[in-house]
């Protein structure tokens, strides 16, 4: 099985964690050396009788490492049994670590003497590519990880089994082939700021833009109402306006969800695809903080309504991995940040132009990368 190892740098841990990791690394190497000696003396060891201050799963990894060193020597694969240095990486098995995405950032969570902690990582292309496959739910992709130190910096070495990647693609290909066999029609829904929603079906070229102008107008209206009342401190009235605004938004979202599902209903066996996760990151980057909350809440509500409405018509709704959906060229497949200027999409490689939100919506419809 082909394995590739990716090295992922942790963002600088706190002093306390740094010290703890150094301590644990030392315990681990001492533990391996001790086990080597005992195995050579013919002892059979289990984690229960290993007197080191480590979690039992990590003790088991130490025993495994020691066994391998001894058997490598006995079978002539190694000329000596090494004495493991205190810089030896701490092994953490697949049950005890996973990736986590929080607010659009990737973390690595793993078990140590401090319990299971999530630490932010430096986001490289490898992280972007592989971390979505290493979350808690996805069991088949995680192998034994190693916690390493180079000078002051900490890294985790993560084995990626290339064949399991292929399995993953195969599995999803099957889902999508089934969809094709049943002649499903993929409908992409892109939610955003410029347009509140763009819905499209790329093969027929049919699309519908929902401008969201009313939303902006109503928000400003409620906002100025609140401001004019704010001075008089008419709190109760302000609260009532808040409630009115929420109700208005709810009605609006319900109607919008209906329109989106109606759009899908014009096709045979439609399937609705939307981006998973953080609408917040994508839609609210340039918004004031107060607006962000109402906005992300409102998008969440809209998605819920779409799912509810679609369920009534037996239309499946699937979440798509949002990675690069807005940068990807719908014509040649080239993905780059510079492909997008505001609401215009222009591929720097092939020159294809499109409305940016429509391009994103088409990419969502074509996407075969299911999330979660
Ligand atoms: Zn292109």
Image (spheres, rainbow, N blue to C red):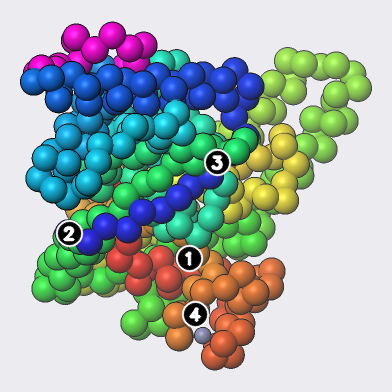
Give the Cα distance between marks 4 and 2.
30 Å
Q: Nearer the viewer, mark 3 or mark 4?
A: 3
Give the Cα distance between marks 2 and 3.
28 Å
Looking at the image, is mark 1 or mark 2 earlier in the sequence?
2
Q: Quadrant of the N terminus?
A: bottom left
Q: Which of the 4 image quarters holds residue 18?
A: top right
The answer to whether the beta carbon of the residue marked 3 is less than 8 Å from any atom of ligand 1 is no
Give the Cα distance between marks 1 and 2.
31 Å
Checking the image for residue 325, the label placed there is 1
In magenta stretch: residue 132: no
Looking at the image, is mark 1 or mark 3 earlier in the sequence?
3
Per the image, label 2 sits on a secondary structure element best described as loop
Above or below: residue 315 compared with residue 293: below
Question: Badge 2 is on which residue?
Answer: 1
Q: Residue furthest bottom?
A: 350
Per the image, label 3 sits on a secondary structure element best described as strand
Residue drawn at the location 67% of the way across and 23% of the way down: 240
Question: Badge 3 is on which residue?
Answer: 150
**Is residue 101 shown left or right of residue 5?**
right
The answer to whether the beta carbon of the residue marked 4 is less than 8 Å from any atom of ligand 1 is yes
In magenta stretch: residue 54: yes
């Amino acid at each position: 099985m082909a394995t590739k190892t990716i090295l992922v740098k942790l963002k600088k841990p706190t002093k306390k964690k740094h010290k703890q990791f150094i301590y644990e690394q030392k315990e681990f190497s001492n533990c391996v050396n001790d086990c080597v000696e005992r195995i050579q003396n013919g002892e059979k060891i289990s984690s229960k009788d290993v007197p080191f201050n480590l979690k039992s799963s990590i003790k088991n990894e130490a025993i495994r490492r020691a066994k391998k060193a001894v058997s490598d020597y006995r079978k002539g694969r190694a000329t000596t049994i090494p004495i493991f240095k205190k810089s030896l990486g701490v092994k953490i098995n697949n049950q005890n670590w996973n990736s986590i995405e929080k607010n659009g950032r990737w973390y690595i969570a793993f078990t140590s003497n401090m319990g299971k902690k999530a630490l932010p990582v430096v986001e490289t292309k490898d992280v972007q590519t592989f971390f979505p496959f290493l979350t808690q739910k996805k069991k088949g992709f995680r192998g034994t990880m190693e916690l390493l130190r180079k000078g002051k910096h900490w890294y985790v070495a993560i084995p990626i089994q290339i064949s399991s990647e292929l399995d993953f693609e195969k599995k999803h290909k099957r889902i999508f082939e089934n969809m094709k066999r049943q002649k499903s029609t993929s409908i992409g829904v892109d939610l955003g700021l410029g347009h509140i929603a763009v819905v499209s079906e790329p093969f027929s070229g049919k699309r519908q833009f929902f401008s969201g102008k009313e939303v902006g107008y109503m928000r400003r209206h409620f906002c100025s109402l609140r401001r004019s009342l704010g001075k008089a401190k008419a709190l109760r009235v302000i609260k009532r306006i808040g409630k009115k605004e929420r109700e208005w938004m709810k009605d609006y979202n319900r109607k919008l969800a209906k329109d989106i599902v109606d759009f899908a209903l014009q096709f045979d066996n439609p399937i609705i695809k939307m981006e998973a996760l953080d609408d917040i990151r994508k839609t609210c980057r340039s918004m004031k903080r107060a607006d962000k909350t109402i906005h992300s809440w409102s998008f969440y509500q809209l998605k819920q309504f779409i799912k509810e409405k679609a369920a009534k018509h037996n239309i499946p709704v699937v979440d798509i991995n949002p990675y690069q959906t807005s940068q990807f060229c719908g014509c040649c497949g080239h993905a780059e940040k510079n492909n997008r200027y505001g609401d215009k999409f222009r591929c720097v490689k092939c020159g294809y132009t499109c409305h940016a939100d429509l391009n994103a919506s088409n990419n969502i419809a074509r996407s075969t990368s299911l999330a979660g």
